[in-house]
Image: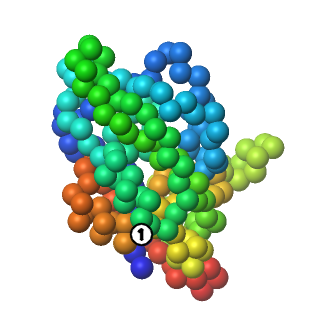
Amino acid sequence: MKYYKLSMDMNRENDIICHFDDKFTIPQNALIMGKYFNQWDDKTVIRFSIEKGSVWTDYLANDKGWFLVSEKLKKILESVDTDIQFLKVTVEEYNGLRLSRKYYFANVLRVVDALCLEKSKYFETEISGIGTVYTVSKYGIYSDKTENSDVFKLGNRQQVPLFVSEKFKSLMEEESITGITLTEIAVQKRAGT
């Protein structure tokens, strides 16, 4: 099976980019580490400037770097093998134009220990009190350690990127999901082979 690193589509123009108010007190890594978040308020609003972008995508850019998904993308994520907490948010325009839509932060909870250093390009850094930290520029994974997940994060301090299966890619293409780029990653079938 093939796997892909999921990223924001950076080749598009005029897409909406969302911003949080200065009063927003949730830490940057709250929805990145693969842990359940229980302090969410469903009345949360984030805003965008129509002068800087007006195209609604299924994966909206935001200044936290969180996975902000449309209802259409949420339905796909609910149909595949993964664990995701969906946190409702309203996205609205700054200037009171009443342009708003419901979106969800998809907090991916499925974290697997599938990083294959043999198939990855990386460098190591030793940090006192933490140990070895890998800075990876090209990812490789062990397919037998993915737990047959269709959407997941990697353990070993690699929780920021999201990874998806061929099944997710096919569903995304069938539904013409926008705002996402998928980059195929290296796969080794079994650990130790």
Compare residues 188 and 113 and report the one nearer the observer: 113
For image coordinates 46% across by 42% down, the residue present is 105
Q: Quadrant of residue 38?
A: top right
Quadrant location, the N terminus: bottom left
Q: Is residue 139 visible?
A: no
Q: Position of residue 130 (x, y in %)?
A: 76, 46
In this rendering, position of residue 116 left or right of residue 183? right
For image coordinates 56% across by 71% down, the residue present is 146
Label 1 CA crowd tier, 10 Å (few <14, some 14–19, many 20+): many
Q: Secondary structure at mark 1?
A: strand
In the image, is residue 21 above or below residue 129? above
Q: Is residue 155 visible?
A: yes
Q: Quadrant of residue 117?
A: bottom right
Q: Quadrant of residue 100?
A: top left
In the image, is residue 166 above or below residue 8? below
Q: Position of residue 166 (x, y in %)?
A: 37, 72
Q: Position of residue 103 (x, y in %)?
A: 38, 39
Quadrant location, the C terminus: bottom right
Q: Position of residue 170 (x, y in %)?
A: 30, 69
In this rendering, position of residue 171 left or right of residue 190? left
In the image, is residue 19 above or below residue 125? above
Number of marks in the rendered image: 1
For image coordinates 59% across by 37% down, the residue present is 29
Compare residues 92 and 119 and report the one nearer the observer: 92
Q: How is the image coloured?
A: rainbow
The amino acid marked with disc number 1 is Ser
Compare residues 76 and 3 and report the one nearer the observer: 76
For image coordinates 47% across by 62% down, the residue present is 151
Residue annotated with mark 1: 165
In this rendering, position of residue 15 left or right of residue 113? left
Compare residues 184 and 37 and report the one nearer the observer: 37
